[in-house]
Every structure is written in C-alpha cells, then in structure tokens.
Image (cartoon, rainbow, N blue to C red):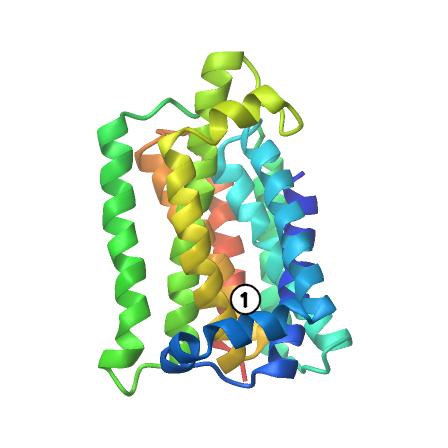
Amino acid sequence: MAVLASTLFGAGAAMQKHGMAAKFPKITWSQLGGQFPSIIKTLVANKLWVGGIFVGIAGGLVMTQALSTGDITVIQPLINLTVVVVVLIGVFFLGESLSASEWAGVAVLLVGAVLVSLSGGELTSKTPSGSALRIFFLVVGALAFFCLVVPNILPKAKPDVMLALAAGVSFGLNNLALKQITIIVQGQLGVFDITSIDAWKIAVVTWPALVIAAGNVVGFIAMQMSFSHGRVSLTTPIVTVISVIVPIIAGVTVFQEQVGILRWAGIIIAVAGAALLSTRNR
C-alpha cells in the first residue's frame, strides 16, 4: 500500500507541476494575495492540474490505510519512492534531465526502500500522551512558519527551497496526524477501514483532523508556489524528504516504535538517496 501511495503521490505532483508551470512561471506572496481568485479560477480550468489534485488525494487515502496496519517508521521511508516516480516522469514526460549523481540518488533511494521493506511490517506503535504529541506539533509547526516567512526577510534565501521545506514540514505533520487518527479509530472500533463510514464519523471530529485541515492548506499553497519557482525534480524531493523525516522523528520519540538496525539502515539510506537528488540537482 505504501508503494502504491508513493506512486500516486509522484504522478499527482508531476501533473500539478506541469499544470502550474504552464499558467504561472512564478508566484509571489503579493501576487497570491492580490490575484488569488483569478489564480484559482485559472488552475481549476486546467484539467491536468485538477487531475493531479485528485490523484494526490487518492494517494493520501491509500497511505492512511497503510498507516493503520504498520509503523510510521516503515510507511514513511517507503513514501520516499515518490521521488523516484517524480524524477522518472520529469525525465521521460516533462523533458527534464538528470546528472550521473542524480541517477545515483535514485539507485540509493531504491536500496533504502528495499531494506525498510525487509525490516518487517509488524505494528509496534504505542498510544502517545496527548501533551507530548501536541508539543511536537507546536514546535514543528513553528518551524514551518519560519520557512514560509524567511524568503520575505532574507533576500538571499531561495524561495523554491524554503517554500518546499515549509510544505514538507506541513505534510509531515499531516502524516503524523493521520497516524494518530488511525489509532483513535482503532481504539473505538477495533479496526481502521478507510471505506468505513463509522471510521470517518469518528475521524472528522478528532483534534488531529484540524491539524490535517490547516496543514493541507499551508502545505498545498507552499508546494504550488515552490513548483512555480523551481523544477519538479528539485522541489518534490525536498518536500518528500522533509515530510518523511518529521513523522520518523515522532515515530521514535513520541510513538516509541521499535526500530531495529536493518530498519534504521534503510531509513538513513532512503533519506540520503532523496537528499542526494536534491543537493546534486543541476
């Protein structure tokens, strides 16, 4: 399920990037504030961009189901495969090119994903205390806000990178909130099923649902703006890596998941591969 989710995320991101770039080469905060209705109207009229949104939503639903059956320290590293999907689409369909080091990053990422998948998928997450989880959300949320405002404060800060970082942190918190929702639903129903109406009734009234709503808005806007400033094979790896690291940190510290040597090796290698794609990007 995690592999399917990453495939859907990658395809959706590439579709959004192509639709965004075709209409808006670059978007600034002033343009977003002054032309928001016209920007949204133009994007909604772009079938490719809208299709990318729905493909991404489908990926989110599949990932939520995956989180209910496995540790977040297993599911999140596998989501790194989104980077591979995006890179291949960028090369073969969007006309982007990769250097030898970037192809090496793809290979390293795949090795890490294989190691994570071999480390076992048993569920070891513990129900965290509400205070610990809320503190984690507040601290990391403040980091996302910092990344959003830095381009306006420091002229030398690269807007595509900082906006991608803000999007990654926001989506990482979303994934963490999704994990907490699955735990809450399982505690009341005994099992989590994404197709269950009862599960949805419980999920939408939980406090993590508010985090997801806010995080999606911030992450979505930041990612679309980063797409307008940079290449899809640069911005998406940054978003993906950060959105994976944030839940992994919480999985170990807040959810107290049992992470063995093989899984740690896979996590580090997978994240390193995605990071290599970002830092060696031409």
Q: Residue at x 56, y 86 (%)?
A: 25
Q: Which residue is mark 1?
A: 236
Which of the two residues, 45 or 181, is positioned nearer the viewer here? 45
Q: Position of residue 203 (x, y in %)?
A: 48, 28
Q: Relative to 132, does residue 122 appear above or below in the rendering?
A: above
Q: Position of residue 210 (x, y in %)?
A: 38, 40
Question: What crowding class fits label 1: few (fewer than 14 Cα within 10 Å), some (14-19), or many (20 or more)?
Answer: many
Q: Relative to 256, does residue 237 appear above or below in the rendering?
A: below
Asked if residue 122 can be seen in this view, the reply is no
Which of the two residues, 39 or 216, is positioned nearer the viewer here? 39
Left or right of residue 193, residue 208 in this image: left
Q: Residue at x 37, y 22 (%)?
A: 127
Asked if residue 199 can be seen in this view, the reply is yes
Mark 1 falls on what kind of element?
A: helix
Q: Position of residue 250 (x, y in %)?
A: 35, 40
Q: Position of residue 245 (x, y in %)?
A: 41, 51
* Residue type marked 1: Thr
